[in-house]
Image: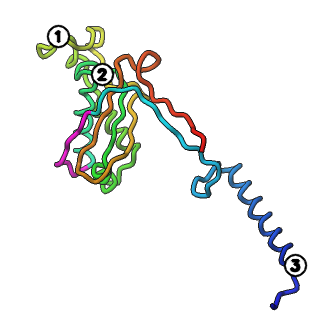
Amino acid sequence: TTNLGLNYRRVLSLGLTVVAMVTAVVVVTVGVIPFLGLIVPNVVSLFAGEGLQGIVDQQSRTPESLARSLAASLKTVAHSKLFGMADAILLVSPEHRRVFKEGGWTKADLRAALYNNLMTPGEEIMRGADGIAEGMPERFKDKILNKFRDDGLHIVTLGGTAGMFSAIIGGWVASGERGSQLVSQPTAS
């Protein structure tokens, strides 16, 4: 064999040391980079909730229309006139996600649109409004209310390619410390 007069083992050791040092500096500076396989924990999330509530929207082809449609379904969690009382998980199907992606929307864009579409004048959801006894107490009449707490709506993507069907898992009434909360824990690999 022909070589350049360098000790192979020394060059290999030096190369590995340099790569290890660069990797260490990157991890310390940037954080763990999952695609490098550096100690990435598995996470399991738990949420005590009701049964799955399907959302069928086969017609929306724009992010704006689909976001309004999803928000209309989300308003029915617990009751369409009870706000701030239950958390929820929105399960976005791959086909619905495609509509958002093709429209240039991110998850943050969807969250903002849902937040805006879930804002409702208190007078529309008061007890007795529209001949329905259930609803929010009178003290909320002059307020604009959001269906969920600021951190009470969780959005995930899952499912197969069966169609434009998303879903909701509504939390138990009295969310927060007294009700349903999303809890995530790392698991052993």
Secondary structure, mark 3, is loop
Q: Is residue 84 or residue 43 the one in the foreground?
A: 43
Magenta part of the chain: 53-62
Residue type beneath disc 3:
Asn
State left or right for residue 186 relative to residue 106. Answer: right
For image coordinates 36% across by 26% down, the residue present is 49
Q: Is residue 70 or residue 109 the one in the foreground?
A: 70
* Residue that label 3 marks: 7
Secondary structure, mark 1, is loop
* Residue that label 2 marks: 144
Percent coordinates x, y for residue 176 in the rendering? 44, 20
Tell how many labels: 3
Establish if 53 lies above or below 159: above
For image coordinates 44% across by 15% down, the residue present is 178
Percent coordinates x, y for residue 182 in the rendering? 45, 29
Residue type beneath disc 2:
Ile
Label number found at residue 133: 1
